[in-house]
Image (tube, grey):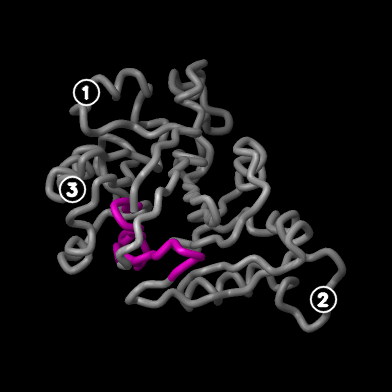
Amino acid sequence: MSGNILIVKITFLGTGTSQGVPVIACDCSICLSEDLNDKRLRTSVMLETDETTLVIDAGPDFRQQMLREHVSKLDAIILTHEHKDHIAGLDDVRAFNYKSQDAIDIFCEERVQKVIKKEYSYVFSEYQYPGIPKMRLNPIAEHGFSVGKIEIIPVRVFHYRLPVYGFRVGNFAYITDANYIPEESKEKLFGVKYLVVNALRKEKHISHFSLREAIDLIREISPKKAFITHISHQMGLHREVSKELPPEIMLAYDGLSFMCDE
């Protein structure tokens, strides 16, 4: 990382699991809750400096999230992996294409690029239909890459058997859709002040950390503050689960933002 210190604003665009909360047709107390903190769009986070705005993952709620946060300029989208709840909103980059008169930079590993080229074949076809999205696919370098002055370090984690990426930006790290982090990846996390970790529910899950597992990881990394994201309705009510957490750990909620010095 460079010696320059940037002030980065972090905003949780969505904190829900692949189905969001409420879940369609579910009548559990969490899905019927009127507490806005229990309304969770699909997981995504936005990083902003004075000059640069980037988003990690663009799921089915991308359009709604951009409108809610009044985003008028977007420099790049970084993808953790290729599952639909993380890439299904990419068609809506068209609005940013029109405003900037340029393609949007998409950063992802080669495997994910192949999926995007298949899922959005009309974007990359020889015949360019008028008005289609413009995407510029960029590889993720293991040693790191930059968007404007924001320097990003990829952190390899595992979503069951699927290798996915978390990311570190200075004193901030973001890990979603994971249930295993190799020791060499943990080394990249030590020293962060702010850590975001996924926890689907309290019970153990095949491809996501449970709440207990997330807490154990947080205590191992020992950040100043930690946030839980990618939360399902099975976790429980926001206000009830929050009472069970230590003061340095909180359930994130949609729209939550804070300032982080890089």
Task: Give the residue at mark 1.
Answer: 244
Q: Amino acid at mark 1?
A: Glu
Is tag 1's residue or tag 3's residue first in the polypeptide sequence?
3
Q: Which residue is mark 3?
A: 217
Q: Are marks 1 and 3 in contact (CB under 8 Å)?
A: no
Q: Within 10 Å of the Cα at label 1, are there few (<14), some (14-19), or many (20+) other Cα atoms?
A: few
Residue farthest to the left, as pictured:
220
Read off the magenta span: 146-174
| Residue 2 pos. (x, y %) | 32, 67
- Residue 166 image position (x, y, % from top left): 35, 59
Which residue ends up furthest to the bottom in the rendered image?
Answer: 126
The secondary element bearing badge 3 is classed as helix
Which sits earlier in the primary sequence, circle 2 or circle 3? 2
Residue 1 lies in what quarter of the image? Answer: bottom left
Looking at the image, which is closer to me, 188 or 80?
Answer: 188
Q: Amino acid at mark 3?
A: Leu
